[in-house]
Amino acid sequence: MNALFDAMQTFNALGLLLMGVVFFGIGFAMIADWLVWRARAYKVKARVVAVRSSGKRRSDEEWAEHYKEEKTAEEAESKSAITYKEQFRQKPVSTGFASVLIGLLCMIPFLFFGIGAYTGYNFLSLKAGGERTLARVVDVESSYDSENGYTYTPVLSFTDNSGYSYRVKDSIGSGSNKISVGEEIFVYYDRDDPEHFVMDRFWRYMGFAFAFMGMSSIFIAVFAFAFVANKKNTGLSMNAKQLKAHKRKHYASQMYTAIYEFVTPHGDTIQVPGTVSSSSIADKLPGSEAVIFVRPDKPDRVRKKSFLFLGIGLVFAMPGVWILYVAFSMLSFTFGGFAMMGAAFVFLAVKVLKSLRRFEEKVPRKEWSKFIKENTRKESDRGYILNADEIRERFQYHQSMMRVTIPITFIVALGMMYGGYYMHHHVTDFVSHAHEARGEVVEMRSRSSDDGYTYYAVVSFKTPSGDTVKFEDNVGSSHPLKKRGDEVDVLYDPEKPRDAMIDRGLLNNLPALGLMLVGFLAFLITFKAWRRQRTARL
């Protein structure tokens, strides 16, 4: 039985190992590529003289024909589908049930918005018109479910202005226990119903309200936009406005490459397309200047100076390091483990050899080099050079999109940085005053979701006073990271021993640092896009 368990654990570890190798490999390759360009290439000022777009050029007539083809296909698909009236006549019970279910699902965003609005109104109205008094936390109730884990809700005791005492529970629970028994907190209560109260914690209630109202508003806006767009885009005929909208819809899938003109160290003026394409045209406008890197051995290979490859490489490499650490910690170097690793290696080797044989049947080995060169042409070698009107249309589309996406991306980036900072501060503060202990994994607890199961280790340890404490670790994964009987280092709060975590050393702060890094990179990219949007001119 132990051999079978070790084999299964090794199988899970091999899956994580493969994932970690892929993530770290992509990140390492991008970082190495960025460093190679910095080490081998020389910098030079260049001027953009043209822009190449992917795809093929279409005239207005061809765009109109393309629009008609899309609409004809949509209408044919719509006609082939059974109408709601016919479906209800054939299957009234199932169709009616489905209609009610869909209606209820559509009401969920409005329900969430209402909950958020009521929570915010309730807090503000009680704070403005309620009675204020000092309350004491007498208990913190905890509940557990497999989906969300533990939820903590404070129970308070206070005396109203008439001298009556009340013991009340707050209406909002949280996943972390930040309120301690014995803590004194001001509360606002309804003089006609003192059990109707709120604590003097603005963000506890308004944060909940903003989160519910904000998320539900996004869903409502998306549904409304989709509904209106669907109503407007009907019919096969096409006016000038619809033609423009149809063309813009396909601009988002196009990639643009700048054609640079620069002077080589030998004094020659040459024009070379960049090796990196993107969906943005604002930084590739003809006449604009840029600093590019040029490979001395291959002057036809140039790249604009940017930290994008380094940033994306770090985004991939850091999770890769974490996944590899987890995978190696799970590997079981036993007979069952070695047997599973050997079987996996043989399986992969057989698959690779079969794929190579099939490929060799289509392309002789002597022609592999030619085949690879023909099928790995640079994106910049495809497509067509845009004229002035085409550049103007795409630039205007890009600017209109940036006015919408930049504020949203700024908010997301700032939220990620704040979330990472909060996590880092919380972990650092906890570690600074936590006590150490040696614990044992007594259970692997799973929670189900649409994406599968997530496993959390339940650890038991003893305090110096002899009390046995159990806690669930806050780090979960799709594969069990530990097994029953494993010994782990534990950090715990001496005042609340159940507030504990598995000590992973330097990796304790890796998720927080990773979140801050991703947020910071997103902020820099968005800030650069914002500056480019403000200064870009045709």
Image (cartoon, helix red, strand yellow):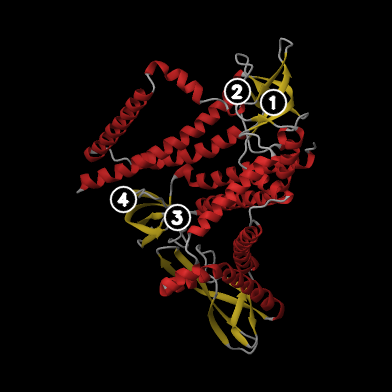
The kind of residue tagged 2 is Trp
- Residue drawn at 60 percent across, 41 percent down: 253
Q: Which residue is mark 1?
A: 259
Going by the image, does 371 lie left or right of 408? left
Q: CA distance from mark 2 to mark 3?
A: 41 Å
- Residue drawn at 55 percent across, 30 percent down: 31
**Dot 2: element:** helix
- Residue drawn at 27 percent across, 45 percent down: 8
1 or 3: mark nearer the eye:
1
The kind of residue tagged 4 is Lys
Q: Dividing the picture into quarters, in which one does residue 267 lie?
A: top right
* Dot 3 alpha-carbon crowd within 10 angstroms: few under 14, some 14 to 19, many 20 or more: few
* Dot 4 alpha-carbon crowd within 10 angstroms: few under 14, some 14 to 19, many 20 or more: some
Q: Earlier in the sequence, mark 1 or mark 3?
A: 1
Q: Which residue is mark 3?
A: 474
Q: Dividing the picture into quarters, in which one does residue 399 lie?
A: top right
The kind of residue tagged 1 is Ile
**Dot 1: element:** strand
Q: CA distance from mark 3 to mark 4?
A: 16 Å
Front-lying residue, 344 or 174 = 344
Q: Which residue is mark 4?
A: 483
Q: Earlier in the sequence, mark 2 or mark 3?
A: 2
The residue at the far top in this view is 266
Q: CA distance from mark 1 to mark 4?
A: 57 Å
Front-lying residue, 218 or 25 = 218
Measured as percent of width and height from the top left, residue 471 is found at 40, 59
Q: Earlier in the sequence, mark 2 or mark 1?
A: 2
The residue at the far left in this view is 1
Q: Is residue 19 above or below residue 134?
A: above
Q: Is residue 489 visible?
A: yes
The kind of residue tagged 3 is Asn
Measured as percent of width and height from the top left, residue 467 is found at 36, 63
